[in-house]
Image (cartoon, rainbow, N blue to C red):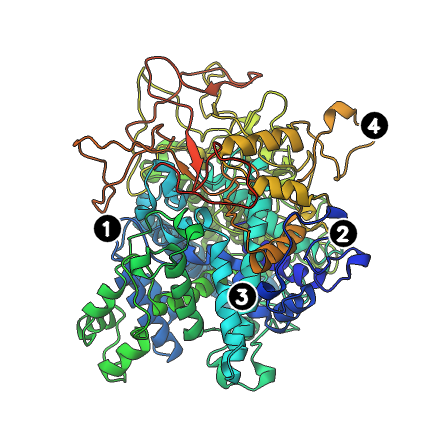
Amino acid sequence: MPGPFTHIYTERRLADFLTQDATAGGVNASFVRDVDGNLISGLDPGMLHGLTPAEAARLMQDWPKFAALGAIGPDFFFFLQDYANPAIPCDEIMFALSLLYWLDDEGRIDEWEGLLAIIADITGNAFVALLRFLIKLSKIWQKFIDALMDVIGPILDAAGQVINDLTGGLLTELGDLFTQLKNDLMTLIAEEALSWQDVFAFFSLKMRSGLDEQAFVWSDMTHYRLTSYVPKQFLEHAKKLRASPNAIDQEHGEQLAAFALGYISHVATDTIAHSYVNEQAGGPFRTHWQRHHLVENHMDAFNYEETGNGHLPADPQVGCIDGYEGFNHSALYFAVQIPKDIDTLPADQKEGKWRQQPLPEGDTREHRKTRKEMLDTDGVLPMWLAETISRVLIEVYAMPKEGGIDSPEYTAERGPHPRNLMGMAFQNDLGDGSALLGKWLSVLGVGDPGEALGDLLEAVAPAPPKDLNIPEGFPLPWEIQVTYRFLLSWFKRQFNTSFDMDKPKRPTWFTPPSSDYNFGPPDFSGVNPSDNPLEQLCEVVLALLDWIWKSLEKAAQLAYDLGKSAISGATLPARQILYDQLILPAWMACENMRQVLVHMAYLSPQSEMLYDDGEIRRPNEIDHELIRLGHGVDGAFAAALASAWDPLGNLDKDPSLTAPAERNPKGGPNKAYPWLPVRPTRKYDGQKTGAGSPPFNSDVVEFQRPWGFPDKTNDPDLTKAGNYIETPQTVPGPYPQDAIPTVLFSLDGPASNRLRYDYEGSGCPERTDEYNEEFIGRAPFTNGYAIPEGTPQESISGTNPLGDPIIFSSYLIGQIAGNPNFRTNFNLDSDRGFGYLCWDWIRVLDTAPKPKPRNLRNQEYDPPETPPEGRVDEWEYPEPTAFGQDPPPLYTNIADHMLRTLKLAYLGRSCDEKPRPINSAPGRAPR
């Protein structure tokens, strides 16, 4: 990623941009702006096959759902259940999910109840730990909200009137609600919190630990290997379909071309925009996974909000509109909803559903039911597209004997491929399906499915066509379909959240103060840790829910007391007192919980909403400072965090982590990039990386304070709290200090076709580093972007050699679709620096008969010469060092110690090559 909205919005603005004439700032027939110079290697009209900028725009605009799904790109595979842990039966989980979605379509089971049943006993799955917790939390909260809304209205209406037994009963019922919410939350913690560790560590890359591609998941593979060749093959299949005499094939060809063009926009956007994220995160996703995700969440929410206030072009279909004001209520899933049986639908229905307006407020049970119906939609990935995705993965990544393309540009960079899925072996082992269908129908609580098992198997897990053999490690077509459905499920959970609540309006005669409430994390300062037996449980969620326990306990007791004393109007407090002490605690419980979870990157931030009279309805959660390059976090969060008490010591409240900061995001003259992840201080000389707590196997503690820049560790002793730079040092990106995320959508930013050619021809990372130092530099501001008036020249350096995402997307479409000499695959995480190509560790090719290391599936692999920081039991903890050093300490080779400076190479390339006439690929780098 960047996040899904940024990707989809970029693709849609790209389609608009491609309609502009070159004389009006658009692109010419070569898909580049005139101001960027001539292409070094021109495009082949025959290879383009009639694809012009205008035609590319038409395809994306005629088939917007396919283009948007393509724009999700490699991130699509985050939802494929292909885990490297052999304890997780990946294919069987996919089978169970496919059955679940079939039953859901038939109205036989609730999707979320079924999902909980499937994942109930699975451990080590990132979605299990996170999704199960959020589903249960959301269910508890929604149950509470439904009951609360039925109670608080009559209570407030009755205030000041003669009170009868009914009113006293309402107050008692409200007390029961608070008590039940408290008990439900504590039960959830007892069930789930013990398994909560650094959940996002499960999403961290397998490269981090030095494993080879056999252990990669497909999201790793499509971000780090042969990244341009995947959409290239989609375009090749689209050409063949469009040339077919069959009208349905032709339509599929257009849909696939739109999907491929969206996918190219993702490749381009990742290549460029990840440099922005990395500049702010302090390093790439590989080493700062949770901070990376946190920054992207706030960027996505910010960009969405900017489409509604005129700072970015409006987009009624996916942008901010009335009824969908916050990103967490954006219903973004409509953008990728492909209607079921699309081939049989009339032409005017093939586009599927979009968001509906007006959307009623969720202020009553009836309105909430209507909202739910309007916001509900399902989609199905057509089987032909699922089969094409399977085919393309095989063509690009499989060995020739398995069906991979046997061509030098492929074989030069191709190595092993993932082996976490069973492929055709699983399909063949299904037999008549009775064993697995029976097992999972029972788990899901369904007796008679209403279908013969043979027919049900065909619906749930159809065999691929005979000409499509799925090798070990590759997903079956129906597993691709399930991946799409799971993506929709996740998007519904993230972008139509039920885990929030409007602040109930104050009584009409009450004048609210200018600052309603502190919306930061709960204030734990008055809590005694010895009075809470839950303090021995784990994670920051406990600290948060400890506060809720006490707050709801007090609110419940007050409600009970009021209920007992409610004899007459004279004995009831004024309505505002009821409001302040009964109604508001429920809302504060929700909002304070959200604030912490948002800053831990578990939830998407919401935008501020006001009532018509200006009273706060929902507070802003988007941290503008967190996404402004070179800055820290906003003052409100910093102040709230400083006053919070954490009984378990899991939240790092160090004010230096939240203090106002202005740092050079390009690393400065002392090349302060990339930072290692934050770990505990070394305890003894020679300490090696620990495995951490299972199932996530990470000793990194950055998840305790992902809002803090990683130049400082959690050690309270400043003489030991300094962090290290991972070496070699690199340039993170071209974006300047004080930039905000909207810069990524610029159409008039710098770019150079000559420099693009140089970057594409880099034979090794060292060459790219040289280009970055020369063409980007280290000064905080960059030519071609906003520079404060009076900035001295020494504070300005370089340019953006490749261009901003929309401009680079257009260029990359031309190169992938029309340049036979284009053989460049960019690393989609900008790891380890801007403009890096796909790389691997230089590996120990030891032919001696000593045992090689093995992954969790017992597969041998060649280890890296220098162990990366995620390599358990090998990577050495650095020596304790002081915080605030300039230049920063470097994690470099030390005599008599294990190698520390990383050694890596571009796949299929070498800096020993002669200057290239084209992007030649003589052979895979040593492994």
Residue 151 appears in view: no
Residue drawn at (70%, 36%), measured in percent from left and top?
799
Q: Are marks 2 and 3 in contact (CB under 8 Å)?
A: no
Give left or right: position of 735 versus 402: right
Q: Secondary structure at mark 4?
A: loop
Q: How many marks?
A: 4
Q: Earlier in the sequence, mark 1 or mark 3?
A: 1
Write down the residue under mark 3: 259
Three-letter code for the amino acid on which mark 3 is drawn: Phe
Q: Are marks 1 and 2 in contact (CB under 8 Å)?
A: no
The image shows residue 283, relative to residue 110, as above or below, that is above
Residue drawn at (42%, 45%), measured in percent from left and top?
545
Three-letter code for the amino acid on which mark 4 is drawn: Gly
Residue density around tag 1, few if under 14, some if 14–19, many if 20 or more, within 10 Å: few
The image shows residue 668, relative to residue 290, as above or below, that is above
Q: Earlier in the sequence, mark 2 or mark 3?
A: 2
In depth, the one of 287 and 774 nearer the eye is 774
Residue drawn at (64%, 70%), measured in percent from left and top?
61
Question: Disc number at residue 86?
Answer: 1
Q: Secondary structure at mark 2?
A: helix
Question: Where is residue 709 shown, x and y percent of the image?
Answer: 54, 31
Three-letter code for the amino acid on which mark 2 is drawn: Asp
Question: Disc number at residue 234?
Answer: none
Question: Disc number at residue 790?
Answer: 4
Q: Earlier in the sequence, mark 4 or mark 1?
A: 1
Residue density around tag 4, few if under 14, some if 14–19, many if 20 or more, within 10 Å: few
Disc 3 versus disc 4: distance between alpha carbons? 46 Å
Disc 1 versus disc 3: distance between alpha carbons? 33 Å
Write down the residue under mark 2: 34
Q: Are marks 1 and 3 in contact (CB under 8 Å)?
A: no
